[in-house]
Image (cartoon, rainbow, N blue to C red):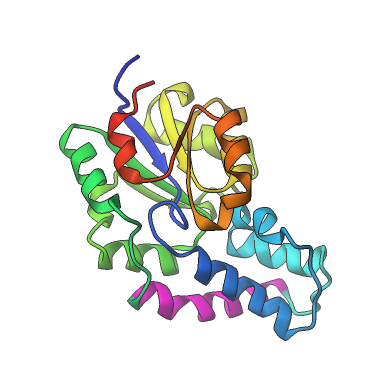
């Protein structure tokens, strides 16, 4: 067992309590256009990023609007919420500062675009705690692709096996694990039905960020 030096955090549902907004906005686009969708669609689209979601809506669900127009619509709906209202999850700020003080290298990898990601982290006073703040857009792929985790590890400058990835989404956690990262699944109400799977499949599972201070791998 050894202390963790390198962390890679998801944003939505992990650092900030934004999943109700993400779910509401992305489904609003479908509802407004009369597009039907499967019950567990949020599990499918959360790791894809705004552009990936827009492509999925257009190519898989048959939304006739151009992909770029769908993406812009989602961003417009989200921007005000992230800029003004979305809060950090409980104990996130305190724990991140404690980890940083202890010399940990903190990084973010999220499906959210910089348009919403950066202003939100800055408003919450968290942005400067991170060495890197990445959107999937920076890599030109999604968190459903194992390669994104390997490329992030290269940029962090650590072996992929020495990075702890934290996400509330089962699919993203699963893909990061396949890429070779250590994985700590994070509780969020949006992923409640997958708790037992998360506890079984990954290295750790936490309900509250304060538990992160006790983890060694």
- Quadrant including the C terminus: top left
Residue 60 sits in quarter: bottom right
Name the residue located 63 percent from the left edge and 55 percent from the top edge: 48
Residue 66: horizontal and vertical position, in percent?
73, 76
Counting labels gives: 0
Quarter where residue 199 is shown: top right
Q: Is 48 positioned to the left or the right of 116 in the image?
A: right
Quarter assignment of residue 89: bottom left
**Residue shown at 33%/68% (left/top)?**
119
- Looking at the image, which is closer to me, 137 or 38? 38
The kind of secondary structure the magenta stretch mainly shows is: helix
Image position of 167 (left or right of 142): left
Asked if residue 62 can be seen in this view, the reply is yes
Residue 4 vs 187, above or below: the answer is: above
Q: Quadrant of the N terminus?
A: top left
What residue appears at the point 26 percent right and 64 percent down from the top-left corner?
A: 124
Residue at the far left: name it.
Answer: 101
Q: Residue 18 versus residue 101: which sits nearer the camera?
A: 18
State whether residue 69 appears in this view: no
User: Which residue: 58% across, 75% down?
Assistant: 25
Residue 197, given in percent of the width and then of the height, sits at 63, 37
- 83 sits to left or right of 21: left
Q: Nearer the viewer, residue 165 or 24?
A: 24
On screen, residue 33 versus residue 93, left or right, reads right
Residue at the top extreme of this rendering: 1
Q: Which residues are magenta?
A: 67-83
- Percent coordinates x, y for residue 185 in the rendering: 50, 39
Q: Position of residue 188 (x, y in %)?
A: 49, 53
């Amino acid at each position: 067992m050894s202390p963790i030096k390198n962390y890679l955090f998801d944003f939505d549902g992990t650092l900030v309590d934004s999943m109700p907004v993400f779910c509401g906005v992305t489904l609003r686009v479908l509802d407004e256009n009369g597009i039907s969708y499967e019950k567990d669609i949020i599990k499918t689209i959360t790791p894809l990023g705004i552009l990936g979601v827009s492509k999925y809506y257009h190519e898989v669900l048959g939304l006739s609007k151009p992909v770029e127009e769908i993406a812009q619509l989602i961003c417009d709906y989200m921007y005000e919420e992230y800029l003004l209202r979305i809060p950090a999850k409980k104990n996130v700020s305190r724990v991140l500062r404690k980890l940083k003080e202890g010399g940990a290298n903190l990084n973010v990898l999220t499906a959210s675009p910089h348009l919403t990601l950066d202003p939100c982290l800055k408003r919450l006073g968290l942005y400067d705690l991170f060495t890197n703040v990445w959107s999937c857009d920076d890599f030109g792929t999604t968190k459903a692709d194992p390669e994104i985790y390997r490329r992030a590890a290269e940029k962090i400058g650590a072996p992929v096996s020495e990075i702890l990835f934290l996400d509330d989404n089962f699919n993203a956690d699963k893909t990061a694990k396949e890429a070779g990262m250590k994985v700590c699944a994070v509780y969020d109400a949006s992923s409640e039905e997958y708790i037992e799977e998360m506890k079984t499949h990954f290295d750790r599972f936490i309900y509250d960020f304060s538990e992160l201070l006790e983890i060694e791998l």
